[in-house]
Image (cartoon, rainbow, N blue to C red):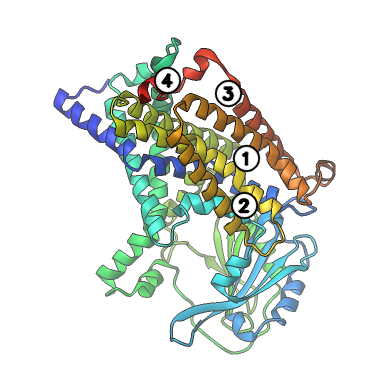
Amino acid sequence: MIKLPKQQTQALLTVHGWSGVLLGLLLYAVICTGVAAVFAREIGDWASPLAQPPSARLPEGFDGAFRGLAKQVEPRFHDDILLFPAAGGRWNLLFHTDEKDAAGKPVERGTEFELDPATLRPLARRDGLLDEIADARTSNAVADFLVDLHVRLHLPNPWGLLLTGTLGLMMMVAAVSGLFLHRHLFKEIFTLRRRGGLLTARDVHVVAGTWNLPFAFLLAFTGSFFSFATTVGVPAMAMVAYNGDIEAATAALTAKKLPEDATPATPADLDTLLADAQQRGGGGLAFVQIEHWGRADGRASVQLAAPEGGLIGDIYLYGLKDGGFIREQPFLGHVPSLGNDLVLLMSPLHFGNFAGVWSKSVWFALGFAGAYVTLTGMLLWTRRRGEQRAWRRMNSAVHAVGYGLPLALALAPYAYFLLRGSSWHPLDTQGLLFLAVTVALIVYAAVTDDLARYRRRLLAATGAALAGLPLARLASGGIGWSAAWQQGLASLLAVELALFVAGALCLRFALRRGAANEALPTAGPAVRA
């Protein structure tokens, strides 16, 4: 039990309340999309599957395929080559270089191949500036839409990152102040009265929020780190120590560069090099960078996924001239360090991807609890102040976002499936449908006098939308369930089952009557009169 003077308790209560209300709707949006983004890889594989299960290992013969593709691009693009996974097990192989446009502005230009993971044959080729190449990637569009909405709310950089970072700090404030406000912390963890109405709603909110406090702080801290590291941290260090030179500051944070030698040299076998890296680290490939291909100073940086039972993967540096191992390369700094390991821990702790589907499931459940706490907190706060017109309108806005956002997210992939192959970019179509649904639901909430019925209708619509997504995927020419079973696409079938179950649960809650419908607070006709 934490005892505080009455004045300090009241001050903390004010801080806790306002940190939950101010930008609370945006925070709820970030948490909701983060819950879905936990399974971003699985969602991408589900939306754009190939005929074989995804794998983190390249098939034998990559070296020959790579050399053949390298001959098809301009030699200047051999300066920097990236290999990274995409949806459905595809691999993207990007050849590019830095140059200046007609106005003297630095740009990056290159050629990218999208490779079939089984045959290593190109499924697509993309040429141009790196921004244009990124826009042309469509296989991962459903997952990318969710992740971008979570990371920066689809706002331009750096404003989106700054906003989500600020929301993360607010979440930290709410978590810390909530810890001190729960005077009977251990008692409230297990207190859940079953009388219905606002009392039960308050108990459920407190229980879920209390159990979720450590996780909420963890998510808020790691999320703020990702948002502020590049938008504030590096520029600030550059301003203080490098006279504003961001490139110099970045170079100081990365591993020490090797001496340059432009003498032509035949590179070593890449299959042998990659096999050695995976044997050393025990994990699959996560990212490969090849610099100065065809030169004596050529090198390859191989980043591995975390091995089974591990939290972070290693990064190994190799010389391309002889394929020899040079050193373990830290992500941050010049030598392996505790700081480097702590930075690498940020991603698995934020996304929960360190133990496969099991850790992701736990993170999903805890994130869902965080979204529930945020929504019910705003509903309770606005309901208690329902005598005021402004708070009644805010209560309508909370309903619109709280129940409308899941519906808009469930409907957005329909634009991807139904307009697949059209001239419209899938990110644009999903964004337009998402925006149209959101605006319509906000208007609907503003004019309705029965928010309880509004809530039930949106839950029912969300359930129908979720359950219909597998059918939309099939209608767009996707792999059938029988074929998916025969080809071992377990993740696809698991996502389909999860969508059906989630849809059924939404429909069940929407159809509940009586006291069950009062479990969450609402502003009914009597309050809105």
| Disc on the earlier residue, 1 or 2 | 2
When the figure is inspected, residue 104 is found, relative to residue 255, above or below; the finding is below
Relative to residue 273, is residue 382 drawn left or right? left
Badge 1 crowding class, 10 Å Cα cut-off, few under 14, some 14 to 19, many 20 or more, is some
Q: Quadrant of residue 93?
A: bottom right
| Disc on the earlier residue, 3 or 4 | 4
| Disc on the earlier residue, 2 or 3 | 2
When the figure is inspected, residue 516 is found, relative to residue 523, above or below; the finding is above
Task: Calculate the distance from the C-alpha at mark 1 to the C-alpha at mark 3.
Answer: 26 Å
Question: Disc 1 designates what residue?
Answer: 357
Question: Disc 4 designates what residue?
Answer: 201
Identify the residue shown where x is 42% and y is 48%.
Answer: 223
Identify the residue shown where x is 60% and y is 30%.
Answer: 460
| Disc on the earlier residue, 1 or 3 | 1
Task: Calculate the distance from the C-alpha at mark 4 to the C-alpha at mark 2.
Answer: 34 Å
Q: Amino acid at mark 1?
A: Val
Task: Calculate the distance from the C-alpha at mark 4 to the C-alpha at mark 1.
Answer: 31 Å
Q: Are marks 3 and 4 in contact (CB under 8 Å)?
A: no
> Whole-percent x and y of residue 12?
22, 31
Closer to us: mark 2 or mark 3?
3
Question: Disc 2 designates what residue?
Answer: 142
When the figure is inspected, residue 417 is found, relative to residue 450, above or below; the finding is below
Badge 2 crowding class, 10 Å Cα cut-off, few under 14, some 14 to 19, many 20 or more, is many
User: What numbered label is drawn on residue 509?
Assistant: 3
What kind of element bears circle 2?
helix
Asked if one can make out residue 451 in the rendered structure from this viewpoint, the answer is: yes
Closer to us: mark 4 or mark 1?
4
User: What numbered label is drawn on residue 94?
Assistant: none
Task: Calculate the distance from the C-alpha at mark 3 to the C-alpha at mark 4.
Answer: 15 Å
Closer to us: mark 1 or mark 3?
3
> Whole-percent x and y of residue 526?
38, 20
Front in this rendered view, residue 186 or 455: 455
